[in-house]
Image (spheres, helix red, strand yellow):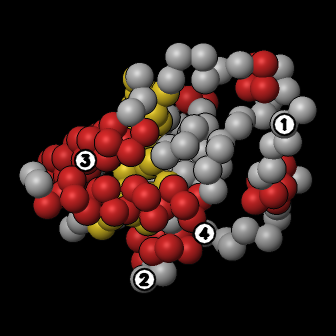
Amino acid sequence: MNTLWAPWRMGYLQGDTNTPLGCIFCRAVETDHDEDQLVLHRSEKAIIMLNRYPYSNGHMMIVPVQHLASLEDLDSETMKDITDMTQVALRTLRTAYAPEGFNVGVNIGKAAGAGVPDHVHVHVLPRWQGDTNFMTSIAETRVVPETLPITLNRLRDIMSETLHSR
């Protein structure tokens, strides 16, 4: 029998109420502690960060610097930057993990499944055939075989190369 070890998820599973108040994305934008906030890259209009509770290894989010609830609220320069950063995220994940596909999406509003409905963000998830199995379907548990610090360091190095080769 294999053992799945993911102690960093316990707070999430128990409904951790010690989360600092305010917007998680604004905290990431405003801090200079990128490693603590899982920030991979910063541009003038957006940041790329890892999802602290990923659906798969490398689950990234592209977050505008501005705290706005929907894509139509963003100016055209920010939308272009988000699109550019989405391309960077895809290239980085292809290099790092060789996924067989991707989910790229935006949940606008609580009814659409947005966990942070007041600050729009784009999810980029690498996918593989069969990555949804009984653990996800029945046990409501995801298996992420790499710790977030390892993922952060791996992707930051590859993303840096990706950005320099553009």
Q: Between tags 2 and 1, which lies in front? A: 1
Q: Nearer the viewer, residue 72 or 25?
A: 25
Q: Quadrant of the N terminus?
A: top right
Residue at which label 1 appears? 2
- Which residue is at a point 79% across and 70% down the rendered structure image? 18
Amino acid, disc 1: Asn
Position of residue 20 relative to residue 101, above or below, is below
Q: Nearer the viewer, mark 1 or mark 4?
A: 1
In the figure, 63 relative to 24: above or below?
above
Between 2 and 112, the one nearer to me in the picture: 2
> Which of pointers 4 and 3 lies earlier in the amino acid sequence?
4
Instruction: Identify the residue at image location x=45%, y=64%.
Output: 153
Specify the amino acid type for callout 4. Answer: Gly
Determine the residue positioned at 60% across, 45% down. 54
Badge nearest the viewer, 4 or 3: 3
Q: Is residue 42 left or right of residue 38?
A: left
Q: Position of residue 42 (x, y in %)?
A: 30, 67
Viewer-proximal residue, 79 or 36?
Answer: 36
> What residue lies at 78% left-to-right and 19% top-to-bottom?
134
Question: Which one is in front in this view, the residue at disc 3 or the one at disc 2?
Answer: 3
Tell me the crowding category of disc 4: few under 14, some 14 to 19, or many 20 or more residues within 10 angstroms, Cα based.
few
- Tell me: 36 left or right of 69: right
The span from disc 1 to disc 3 (Cα, nearest Å) is 35 Å
**Circle 4 — which element?**
loop
- Mark 3, residue position: 88
Q: Please provide percent x and percent y for residue 126.
A: 45, 33
